[in-house]
Amino acid sequence: MKDQTDKQVTQFIDNIFENSSLESPSLEFSTQVMSKIHAINNTKVTTYKPLISRSVWIAIAVVFVGFLAAILVNVTFTQASWLTFLDFSIVSRLGNIFPSTQLPTSLVYAILFFGIMLLVQLTWLKRYFNKRLQF
């Protein structure tokens, strides 16, 4: 039964292919396709624009550092009536944890060099990926 169905399907497919004609594209087919490709390439691509610009981020950072510096310069540890249960004497002792310890000069230079190289690599990688993502 299955063989008979397979033979009928095969005959039907052969009949369709014998009776159909081979279609060929028009003479202007390749020029029409290329013109559509050029039209797609010429469309304006949406570029990335951050919501917060670089200058605003710099201003936020400057304000934050300014507030932090103002707080650190003007800080006085007086006990208010609602903060009597807190002990602020530990803050004054933090500076005396390692009073005689000094960092070796080579370690300071190594940390400085590491920081500089980290900044250089970050800027280089950012430029590299920005150029790679642009088409």
Image (cartoon, rainbow, N blue to C red):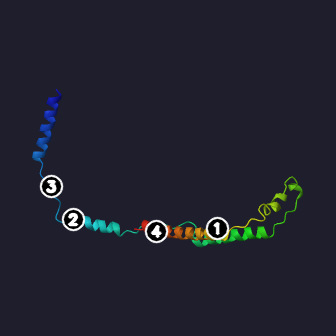
Crowd rating for badge 4 (residues with CA inside 10 Å; few <14, some 14–19, many 20+): few
> Residue at (77%, 65%) from the top-left corner?
100
Residue 29, given in percent of the width and then of the height, sits at 20, 63
* Lower position in the chain sequence, tag 2 or tag 1: 2
Q: Nearer the viewer, mark 3 or mark 2?
A: 2
Depth check, front residue: 119 or 73: 119
Q: Earlier in the sequence, mark 3 or mark 1?
A: 3
Q: Quadrant of residue 62?
A: bottom right
Residue 23 - label: 3
Question: Relative to residue 88, is residue 18 depicted above or below?
Answer: above
Nearer-N-terminus badge (2/4) = 2
Instruction: Tell me whether the residue at label 3 lies in contact with that at label 2, contact meaning CB atoms closer than 8 angstroms.
Output: no
Task: Name the residue beneath numbered marker 4.
Answer: 128
Q: CA distance from mark 3 to mark 1?
A: 78 Å
Position of the C terminus by quadrant: bottom left
Q: Label 3 crowding class (10 Å Cα cut-off): few <14, some 14-19, many 20+?
A: few
Q: Identify the residue under disc 2.
A: 30
